[in-house]
Image (cartoon, grey):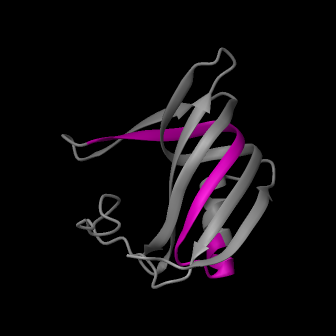
């Protein structure tokens, strides 16, 4: 489905805020019903997850130390009538090792956020985190 681009936001998350809830609250305040999100910076006490398709749920991984948020990309959709952030991240440690997955939470040390709003009808999550849009035949 073709989409129209709406507003574009570049913002910085304040230190010690929880990143997922901060972006979600921002989207709610701005009335964003769909969008593309990119973020870089640094986090403390992050929790990421790997979705195990056999078990049918996320395996959570706690990272209790400071990490560079090397890349974060995701989307905003509507779930239960509220904005919902689905964000995947790559986090790097001081030795250059990386971990990645779905971001559940993380305390911001530095958070630089880019949001591109999608104006057309909002995308709705209907079956948990697995199905955002129906597949598009080519």
63 w.r.t. 85: above or below: above
How many numbered marks have been drawn onto this rendered protein structure?
Answer: 0
Front-most of 95 and 35?
Answer: 35
> Whole-percent x and y of residue 31?
62, 82
Q: Is residue 50 above or below residue 4?
A: above
Q: Estimate the x, y position of residue 30 in percent, counting from the top left.
A: 68, 79
Identify the residue at image location x=54%, y=42%.
89
| Left or right relative to 23: residue 136 | left
Residue 36: in magenta span: yes
Determine the residue located farthest toward the bottom in the rendered image: 121
Given residues 70 and 137, the one toward you in this image is 137
Residue name at image x 30 percent, y 58 percent? 130
Residue located farthest toward the top when viewing the structure as drawn: 95
Horizontal placement of 2 versus 29: left or right? left
Name the quarter where the C terminus is drawn: bottom left
On the picture, is 102 further left or further right than 97?
left
Closer to the camera in the image, 61 or 136: 136
Dominant secondary structure (helix, strand or loop) of the stretch shown in magenta: strand
Whether residue 85 is visible to the viewer of this picture, yes or no, is no
Please determine whether, in this image, residue 102 is positioned above or below residue 29: above
Residue 78 in percent (x, y) is at: 46, 75
What percent of the width, then of the height, locates residue 20? 60, 56
Q: Quadrant of the N terminus?
A: bottom left
Q: Residue at x 70, y 71 (%)?
A: 8
Give the extent of the magenta segment: 27-52
In this view of the protein, which residue sits in the foreground, 134 or 51? Answer: 134
Can you see residue 74?
yes
> Magenta span has 80?
no
């Amino acid at each position: 489905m073709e989409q129209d681009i709406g507003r574009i936001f570049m913002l910085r998350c304040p230190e010690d805020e929880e990143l997922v809830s901060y972006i979600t609250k921002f989207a709610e305040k701005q009335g964003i019903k769909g969008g593309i999100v990119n973020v870089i910076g640094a986090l403390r006490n992050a929790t990421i997850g790997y979705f195990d398709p056999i078990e049918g749920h996320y395996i959570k991984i706690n990272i209790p130390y400071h990490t560079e948020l090397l890349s974060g990309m995701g989307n905003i959709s509507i779930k239960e009538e509220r904005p919902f952030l689905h964000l995947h991240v790559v986090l790097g440690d001081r030795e250059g090792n990386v971990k990645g997955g779905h971001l559940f939470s993380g305390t911001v040390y530095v958070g630089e956020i880019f949001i591109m709003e999608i104006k057309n009808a909002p995308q709705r999550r209907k079956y948990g985190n697995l199905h955002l849009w129906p597949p598009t035949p080519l």
